Amino acid sequence: MPTLSKRFSIKARDYLRAGEVSIEVQEILKKIGFGAELIRRVSICAYEAEMNVVMHGGDGTLHLFVDTSAIALVVKDSGPGIENIELAMKEGYSTASEEAREMGFGAGMGLPNIKKNSDSLKIDSEKGRGTLVAISFEVKGP
Amino acid sequence: MNRSSSYIQMDQALCTGCVLCMKACPTKAIRIRHGKATRDETKCIDCGECIRVCPKGAIKAVTTWSGKTELSSYSVVGVSPVLYAQFGNEVMPNDVLLALRKIFDYVYDEAYAHELYSAATELYIKGNRGKEDAVWPLISPVCPVVNRLIALRFPSLLKHLLPFIPPREIAAREVRKRFTKKKIFGDHEFAVYHLSPCSAKMISIKEPMFTETSYLEGALGINDVYEMVVRHLREEDEDIMLHVSSGAGIGWGMSGGEIAGLDDVSCLAVSGIQETIRYLEKIEMGLFRDIEYFEFRSCPEGCIGGPLTVADKYQAKGVLQKFGRMFGQGKRVRRAQAQRAYQEGWYLSETRKIRTVKEEKRLSIAEAIARQERIEAILQKLPRKECGHCGSPDCRTFAEDVADGKLTIESCFVLNPRS
């Protein structure tokens, strides 16, 4: 089965280039020809996950995996980690910096939005040890 | 050349095979092959970026006027306010309309339709607030290039287009109705044309997205009539008022003009094709949920930056801003009239035909993933100088062309300087 695997790097606090990785992911999925709704959901999740790294993480990576049955995004960073994952999943809960908020980010909707738009979300994080977020989507239809 | 409806023509004799049009094309429809620019017309959105950058003038937009010196039958012309901005500060909109009247049988000011349209847009937005099935942000359907760009590259956003017939079409429909009823030209046939700065109006008339067929017979470019208007401007003036719009309607000629007429609506105006693409990508990623309405114009600074204009866009903007102050920002249309028309369904689109893009062959998802893998592998080998020397616009597109067997990797000039 053909599997596409591509890794992108994300720089922390690089607000100027923030979103570029998600746009590239979106382009690749469009080129493959997935349905518009699936691409929209993946794009939203990729963007939220990318922004989380930009806002909170040390530098990180987004790894895109695509095959005929699923699309997965694995986002890793070397940031401060999430102290309380359950709390982080709550809408409106945010630990974003003043800098991020001033630019209109950090409204505490990132992880809840990913949860809402994906088929599966796994978060592995500990305070001081960085964060790994694995998001996947089923590919239905022919 | 199988799409008969192409209104952007490339003159092979004048083309020197430089890379400028290929680099400027937002949909990567152009390649340089055998030393000449060629175009995949299924990807062309008629934006005219290539016309703007060609140093040899080898690319031209075809209008109804092309190759003609007069129009047959009685001609009725709807005028984009961009025309008013072409003759400097001293020439008033009414002078321009009077000069046009000497060339055509009847002219009307489209800016008035713009004011009605703004009022209707406001009613639609306010009426849909809080509705569960409402789609936000809405996207203005006025720029035909943006509509085609969305159909081609952002199909998931088609449902965001405000389901309204563009104002130039509404104005033409109403004029047509009135003239037929009142027999203005007796029993003679007449034709309604749109006079505009835009290279995409011809295609939007031939293949309309919001009506079954267009209410317009064709489009004329501002550059088609410019010299004739200048000639007639010097003539003795008649004393009639053809200009009926306020500064609000005229302001539609520049970026931000459409949304300036929307009261108490959260909206944003974006112009230029690259900026438009950036914003559409972000809307697709779920951003801008707090914006209700987006005005996009593919030309820089809005329609005054259109490829068929004559005056410089910043000078034109200065003129429109002056008219804005002079004629005021209040709408001339009566609110009650706009509301009644809205309730009668004046504005609502009759249909939404999506111009489907015929691809050469539709790959299965498995094949497409395999192709993408090949592209990524080829891309790894490329120097990423993005020079375009190979005849493809950038390294990624070159990798796609190689993966599709259209080129070999040996065509990369940086890898193979002797190629």
Image (spheres, coloured by chain):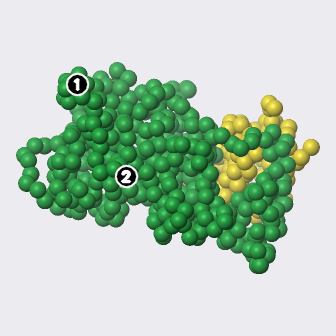
Chain colours: A yellow, B green
- Above or below, B97 against B119 in this view is below
- Using the rendered image, report if marks 2 and 1 lie on a common chain: yes
- Residue positioned 46% across, 40% down in the render: B204
Chain bearing tag 2 is B
Quadrant in which residue B178 is drawn: top left
| Mark number displayed over residue A67 | none
CA gap between label 2 and label 1 equals 28 Å
Q: Amino acid at mark 2?
A: Gly
| Mark number displayed over residue B187 | 1
In the foreground, B37 or A56? B37
Task: Report if the CB atoms under discs 2 and 1 are less than 8 Å apart.
Answer: no
Q: Would residue B336 be seen by someone viewing this image from the given angle?
A: no
Q: Secondary structure at mark 2?
A: loop
Along the horizontal axis of the image, is A45 left or right of A101? right
Along the horizontal axis of the image, is B262 left or right of B27? left
| Mark number displayed over residue B67 | 2
Q: Position of residue B208 (x, y in %)?
A: 47, 35
Q: Position of residue B54 (x, y in %)?
A: 50, 66
- Residue positioned 31% across, 25% down in the render: B341
N-terminal of the two: label 2 or label 1? 2
- Residue positioned 33% across, 50% down in the render: B68
Q: Amino acid at mark 1?
A: Asp
In the foreground, A48 or B81? B81
